[in-house]
Amino acid sequence: MVGGVCQGMIGSRASRTRSGAVLLVAALALSACSSTSIDDGSSAQPAPVSSQPGPLPTVPPQDFGSPPPFGQGDLDAAVQDAVDGLLVAAASGAGGSLDGQTGAITRMGSSGDARLGWLFSDLLRFTQG
């Protein structure tokens, strides 16, 4: 008898759960289909969007100073060897690494050529992950 009573309780609980789920789905469907706008009797229209760009803000000019000196023509042979070594180190392995390239980095930096600064910053971006 206990088994029958438990079975009846489980059956009615499952039935209540299904009924609750059906009611929940119906309530969600009704709320999704209902209108959320409130008619206040006014006939206000949304503001038109202009396809013409507006004026740009005026910004006072800024003086960034003189550009740094940069080399002209080919690099010195020792500096070119340093660059080649760094490129090989950066391209080797998974993601590359500049470990052990202190001498090449020092040679590039001591050259005073600003072009190498851009190259080095790119190498750092690619090898630092």
Image (cartoon, rainbow, N blue to C red):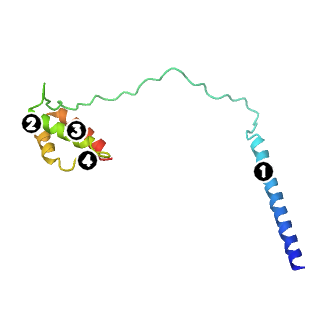
Position in image of residue 67 (x %, y %): 18, 30
Labelled disc at residue 87: 3
Report which residue position mark 2 lands on.
78
Which mark sits nearer the N-terminus, 2 or 1? 1
Tag 2: residue type? Ala
Which mark sits nearer the N-terminus, 3 or 1? 1
Tag 1: residue type? Val
Nearer the observer: mark 2 or 1; the answer is 2
9 or 34: nearer the viewer: 9
Position in image of residue 40 (x %, y %): 75, 37
The span from disc 2 to disc 1 (Cα, nearest Å) is 75 Å
Labelled disc at residue 25: 1
Is there a contact, CB below 8 Å, between mark 3 and mark 1? no
Furthest residue to the right? 1
Which mark sits nearer the N-terminus, 2 or 4? 2
- In the rendered image, is residue 112 in sight? no
In what element is the residue under mark 2?
Answer: helix
Going by the image, does 81 lie left or right of 40?
left
The span from disc 3 to disc 1 (Cα, nearest Å) is 62 Å
40 or 12: nearer the viewer: 12
The span from disc 1 to disc 4 (Cα, nearest Å) is 57 Å
Establish if 83 lies above or below 56: below
In what element is the residue under mark 4?
Answer: loop
Report which residue position mark 4 lands on.
97
User: What crowding class fits label 4: few (fewer than 14 Cα within 10 Å), some (14-19), or many (20 or more)?
Assistant: many
The span from disc 4 to disc 3 (Cα, nearest Å) is 10 Å
Residue found 53% across the figure and 21% down from its top: 51
